[in-house]
Amino acid sequence: MADGIPKALRERIADAAQQRCGYCLTDQRVSGAQMHVEHIVPRARGGSSQESNLWLACAWCNSYKGIQVEAQDPETGASVTLFNPRRQRWIEHFLWSQDGTYIRGVTATGRATVVALNLNNPYIVPARRLWALAGWHPPK
């Protein structure tokens, strides 16, 4: 419980998230890296450690997200709330490129989240390419 999240709660969140990052869908079993329990509304912004405000995130997404809760849609310039993996459906806001390596935002929320969380950062895209070759990616 080093991060203040009890083990049983951490396990419930991981199971609910299917062991995948709520933002980029990276699978913990494929990446080999332990996922973080992420505060959707960060504690620094008044978010709680209640289960309803927690989800699984990979280290990349969690670090890029930081204390952000909204970002600018690059298409419209509007400030929008970031994607909430607990309350919103990924498929309604994002899609995979044909080769399964890039995430594309299809809504203002999706586009803003792709940019704010750098979902196509230069470290994860090559890994996704290898995972796709192995048949492990993109997630179904």
Image: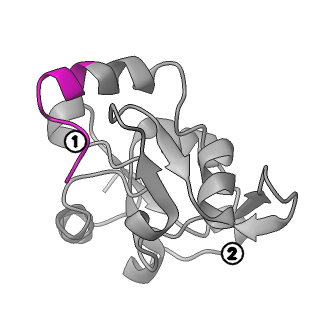
* Colour mode of the rendering: one colour
Highlighted range, magenta: 130-140
Q: Is 75 placed left or right of 102 in the picture?
A: right
- In the image, what residue type sits under mark 2? Gly
Q: Is residue 6 visible?
A: yes
Q: In this view, does 129 lie to the left or right of 72?
A: left
Up-down: is 91 above or below 48? above
Between tags 2 and 1, which lies in front? 1
Q: Please report the residue visible at 57 percent of the width from the left and 59 percent of the height from the top.
A: 106
Q: In which quarter of the image is the N terminus?
A: bottom left
Which label sits on residue 46?
A: 2
Amino acid beneath label 1: Gln
Examine the residues drawn in magenta and state their main secondary structure: loop
Residue ID for mark 1:
28
Determine whether the residue tagged by mark 2 lies in a helix, strand or loop. Answer: loop
Reply above or below: 22 against 122.
below
Badge 2 density bin: few <14, some 14–19, many ≥20, Cα 10 Å? few
